[in-house]
Amino acid sequence: MDATVQLNKKYALDCQYLHLYFSGNGSINNQKLVEILASKNLEELKLIRHIYSALYNHDLLHLLFTAQRTNKFTRVAYLHMREPHERDAEMLRGALFGSSVDPDILTTIVCTRLPSDLRSVKQAYRARYNSNIEQDLATKTKGNLKEILLAILNSSGISGARVDMSMAMCDAKVIYEAMESGKSIDRKTIVSLLSLRSTGQLKAILDSYKQLYGHELFKSLKQEKCGEFGKILRIIIQSIQYPAKHFTKKLRGALRNNNAQEVLIQTIVTRSSIDIKEINNLFSAKTGWSLESLVRNEFNTGSSSSSGANTDKANGLAADFLIALLKH
């Protein structure tokens, strides 16, 4: 039998298994269901979507989208099956046009994605919503957050430039003067630099600042005169320079606020092939918990009602799915 035919037959069997889950017309092995989705790369998942549509005349992604609001397993599956740039575009749209603006999601996506990825997100956003991120962000946000995020979005358009260490040293001195030369900081100069330097160049500036002045810019921004601008810029800088620290801090904050499920889902799904091991190590060092143990704890509801039993099943599947992604 031709290898391609064998491969398509295997994916057709996977689709049949997924259809059993969505139709509720048969008993399934939960571990098998998780394995089908968690073990596949993006191209394989796209092929499964194509075959599922051909077999059952339904878009698998649409089925997941419809169910994700009330089912944590389908929430994980939906985010996992999306193209990363389309997923980020949708999350940005939700953060801007939801019931209230979500500055945390805006900051996370704008500041932890590679410039090339962010350019793809902009294109996906424009194609889907017939608008651009900068325009919508300028309309929906205000103040320091708006000013700084727009600068970072602007800098993402700078591509192909090599890091210039001499320029980085000069820029570090410019930032120091903007921070220290008066009773208030020169915000305009700092924001201008953010908008004109690539992410790689900005990281070099931050390294140069520490080399020249013996401490991180992060520390200087804690001065009282930096105010709200300094607070927001600290978050932005950490997100760009140390993404794993940013996600670790997000998880710890969510744990304190008792809303860790969605933050766990977003973090593990979006960072599973990037830096999830580093995030896990940092989180464990700070809390004594591994991400796996946190997932098991957060998705263990223990309800005894009929609807609760269904929720428990979905939560158990979500937990297994997230743990599989952690291990992959």
Image (tube, rainbow, N blue to C red):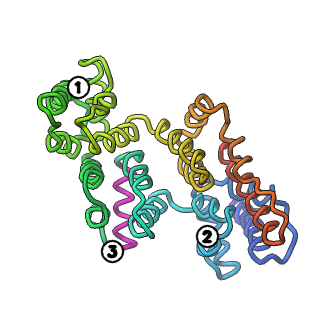
Looking at the picture, tell me which residue is in the foreground, 85 or 192. 192
Label disc, if present, on residue 315 of the rendered structure? none
Label disc, if present, on residue 165 of the rendered structure? 1
Q: Residue 56 appears at what percent x and percent y?
A: 70, 80
Which residue is the extreme one toward the left? 182
Contact flag, marks 3 and 1 (Cβ < 8 Å): no
Cα gap from disc 2 to disc 1, whole angstroms? 48 Å
Q: Is 186 drawn above or below residue 119 in the view shown? A: above
Q: Look at mark 3 in the image and give the residue it sits on.
A: 130
Q: Residue 254 appears at what percent x and percent y?
A: 56, 48
Q: Is 287 drawn above or below residue 120 in the view shown? A: above
The answer to whether residue 129 is magenta is: yes
Q: Secondary structure at mark 3?
A: loop
The stretch of residues the image draws in magenta is 116-130
Q: Look at mark 2 in the image and give the residue it sits on.
A: 69
The mark closer to the camera, 2 or 1, is 2
Q: How many marks?
A: 3
The answer to whether residue 241 is magenta is: no
Cα gap from disc 3 to disc 2, whole angstroms? 25 Å
Cα gap from disc 3 to disc 1, whole angstroms? 39 Å
Q: Amino acid at mark 1?
A: Met
Looking at the picture, tell me which residue is in the foreground, 84 or 47. 84
Quarter of the image for residue 302 reads bottom right
Q: Amino acid at mark 2?
A: Arg
- Reading the chain from its start, which is encountered first: label 3 or label 1? 3
Q: Residue 94 appears at what percent x and percent y?
A: 45, 66
Give left or right: position of 59 versus 247.
Answer: right
Quarter of the image for residue 311 reads bottom right
Name the residue at 27% across, 44% down. 229
Q: Residue 208 appears at what percent x and percent y?
A: 26, 23
Q: Residues within 10 Å of mark 1 (few under 14, many from 20)?
A: some
